[in-house]
Image: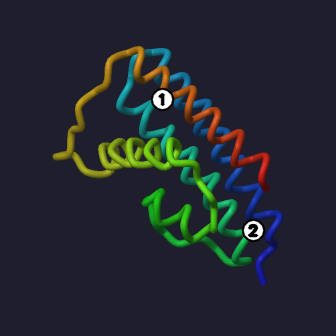
Amino acid sequence: MIDLQKQIDYWIAGAVDDLISAEILIQKERFLHGLFFCHLAIEKAIKAHIVKGTENIPPRSHNLMLLSARAGLEIKDGDEIFLGILMKYQLQGRYPDYNPAIPEKAKVFAYLKQTKDLLLWLKERL
């Protein structure tokens, strides 16, 4: 049997660390890498919800839609669209031949804020 709280804490601590990394990278105008870490922060927070809801280790998936469904989260429409946007940037770090368009600076900062807001929402529901 797994220690549920230890697993939840692990995923949330990772999410918080990744958000810090995202913010640093975006401040340094390393936008693709920063958005990759935005995705990673949300992925890990959702995985904490999977642990809480299923009492099992989360699947080894990076698909935010699949993970949020597995967690039983009721994501608002706007946030669901945002999950789809973040999905584009998780591939960049894993596949060298995939290069998504880099959004304008203002849009990247808006995505960072949305990541912070969504992470807070996810943490409040644990």
In percent of the image, x 58 and y 39: which residue is there?
18
Give neighbour class at mark 2: few <14, some 14-19, many 20+ (Cα, 10 Å).
some
Question: In front: 66, or 97?
Answer: 66
Name the element at disc 2: helix
User: N-terminal of the two: label 1 or label 2?
Assistant: 2
Q: Which mark is residue 2?
A: none
Between 36 and 68, the one nearer to me in the picture:
68
Residue at the image position 69 percent from the left and 62 percent from the top: 49
Q: Residue furthest bottom?
A: 1
In the image, which disc is placed on residue 52? 2
Is the residue marked by circle 1 packed among few (<14), some (14-19), or many (20+) residues within 10 Å? some
- Residue 30 at x, y percent in the picture: 39, 23
Does residue 120 appear left or right of residue 107 in this picture? right
Residue 88, located in which quarter of the rendered image?
A: top left
Mark 1 to mark 2: distance in Å?
27 Å
Res. 111 mark: 1
Q: Give the residue at the far left of this rendering.
A: 97
Up-down relation of residue 27 to residue 114 (above or below): above
**Above/below status of 89 relative to 24:** below
For numbered disc 1, what is the local secondary structure? helix
Callout 1 amino acid = Tyr
Q: Residue furthest front?
A: 77
Q: Quadrant of the N terminus?
A: bottom right
Task: From the top left corner, tell me how far across and down residue 91 is, in percent.
Answer: 32, 49
Report the residue at 53% width, 72% height from top: 59
Query: Residue at position x 71%, y 39% from top?
Result: 120
Q: How many marks?
A: 2
Q: Is residue 42 above or below residue 115?
A: below
Pinpoint residue 79: horizontal percent, then vertical percent: 53, 44
Quarter occupied by the C terminus = bottom right
Residue 4, percent from left and from top: 80, 70
- Amino acid found under the numbered disc labelled 2: Lys
